[in-house]
Image (cartoon, rainbow, N blue to C red):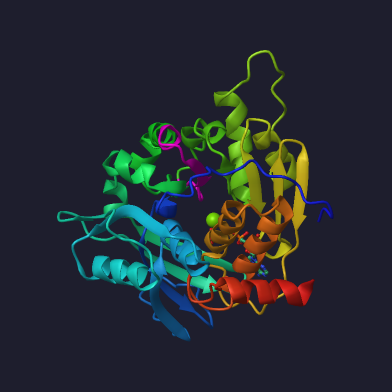
């Protein structure tokens, strides 16, 4: 980690805006099965696992709840169905203090749902997208974008209309005077270039290391800078090379690496954030909780090292419980956790 605080590109200075953060993205329940052997066996086998928990999931929703818990004035825009699971999602968001009025309740599709088979260090997820596939970012009004300092966009690969409308949405956010971050999540279809065109437009990109490598490979093909040589794509395991390459296209890049922590690159400046030891139960949502911590630090005007450290604390603490939001800290808990390691 750098000893000297590194100045960050500033978030939108809009003190009179009523919201700090609008999250645009996925909100759905996660059914998490964990403890014991969670490997399914086809051929009509029934296997006993130790725990099954229905929790709020969706990368966007987990980030929104994490941010609200850290004290940010937060709203969520997305789509759920008019059903039991949709009401569960809205209730969990509202209980956490997230404004849910911009979440659309659609009458003709069910709420999306994920089933996660979770081990302490890995997981397999099955997702039925339902309303996630119907969410249209054109339904997010300009008025709402003008109410917030910052917009965080989550999971465009799971929401095809969000993916198709991504560059338009980012342009509208900037026109409304707010800044933008993007956590693409994994692309189940492996067509990274469909989102890579938007990457140079965002202020902050928050991939994990596998996603960073894929995006770095997709980037030069869709966004060659006239007059500059296109760098070779980095090897898939070189997260720093991937981050540097992406950062060369403009955004502040923060790459998350699970139990190995995180690295942030802004221009040529590199800041490493160490992961802290925790007794991890389930890493679902660690990256989304990291996003909440990093953005809370960034929007507060913290230096890059401090923002990365707050992200790492929030990511680590979130792994202590099954699901994305159960272990998310408030500001006092996150700072106490950081102070112990200082
Ligand atoms: N086992 C762990 N121990 C300590 N810190 C962890 C652990 N797992 C994750 N973290 C912290 O959380 C951050 C984000 O985790 P990770 O790299 O798994 O993100 P991700 O792959 O985007 O996760 P997801 O998409 O499920 O939210 C890491 O950078 C690290 O700081
Ligand atoms: Mg992630």
Residue 272 falls in which quadrant of the image? bottom right
User: Which residues are drawn in magenta?
Assistant: 173-188
Residue 152 at what x, y percent from top left?
A: 47, 49
Work out whether 193 lies above or below 114. Answer: above
Q: Nearer the viewer, residue 296 or 125?
A: 296
For ligand 2, give the image quadrant: bottom right
Residue 157 falls in which quadrant of the image? top left
Seen at 60% across and 41% down, the residue is: 214
Report if residue 120 is visible in the image.
no
Image quadrant occupied by the C terminus: bottom right
304 sits to left or right of 109: right
Seen at 51% across and 50% down, the residue is: 186
Residue 23 at what x, y percent from top left?
A: 42, 53
Seen at 58% across and 71% down, the residue is: 331
Work out whether 133 lies above or below 282. Answer: above
Work out whether 161 lies above or below 53. Answer: above
Residue 116 at what x, y percent from top left?
A: 45, 68
Number of numbered discs overlaid on the protein picture: 0
Q: Nearer the viewer, residue 258 or 293?
A: 293
């Amino acid at each position: 980690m750098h000893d000297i605080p590194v100045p960050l590109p500033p978030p939108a200075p809009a003190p009179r805006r009523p919201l700090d953060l609008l999250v645009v993205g996925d909100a759905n329940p996660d059914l998490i099965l964990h403890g014991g052997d969670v490997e399914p066996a086809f051929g009509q086998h029934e296997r006993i696992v130790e725990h099954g928990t229905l929790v709020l999931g969706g990368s966007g929703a987990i980030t929104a709840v994490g941010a609200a818990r850290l004290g940010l004035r937060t709203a969520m825009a997305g789509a759920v169905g008019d059903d039991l699971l949709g009401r569960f999602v809205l209730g969990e968001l509202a209980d956490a203090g997230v404004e849910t009025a911009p979440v659309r309740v659609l009458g003709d599709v069910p709420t999306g749902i994920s089933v996660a088979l979770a081990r302490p260090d890995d997981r397999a997820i099955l997702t039925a997208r339902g309303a996630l596939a119907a969410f249209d970012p054109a339904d997010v009004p300009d008025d709402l974008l003008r109410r917030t300092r910052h917009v965080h966009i989550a999971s465009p690969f799971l929401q095809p209309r969000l993916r198709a409308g991504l560059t338009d949405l980012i342009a509208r956010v900037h026109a409304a005077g707010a800044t933008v971050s993007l956590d693409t999540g994994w692309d189940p279809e492996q067509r990274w270039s469909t989102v890579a065109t938007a990457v140079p437009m965002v202020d902050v990109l928050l991939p994990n290391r596998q996603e960073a490598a894929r995006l770095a490979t997709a980037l030069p093909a869709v966004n060659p800078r006239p007059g500059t040589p296109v760098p070779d794509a980095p090897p898939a395991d070189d997260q720093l090379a991937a981050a540097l390459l992406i950062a060369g296209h403009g955004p502040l890049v923060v790459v998350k690496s699970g139990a190995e922590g995180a690295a942030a690159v802004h221009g040529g400046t590199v800041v490493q954030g160490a992961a802290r030891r925790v007794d991890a139960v389930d890493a679902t949502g660690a990256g989304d909780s990291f996003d909440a911590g990093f953005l809370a630090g960034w929007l507060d005007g913290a230096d890059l090292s401090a923002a990365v450290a707050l992200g790492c604390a929030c990511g680590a603490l979130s792994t202590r419980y099954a699901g994305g939001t159960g272990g998310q800290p408030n500001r006092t808990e996150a700072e106490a956790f950081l102070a112990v390691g200082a």
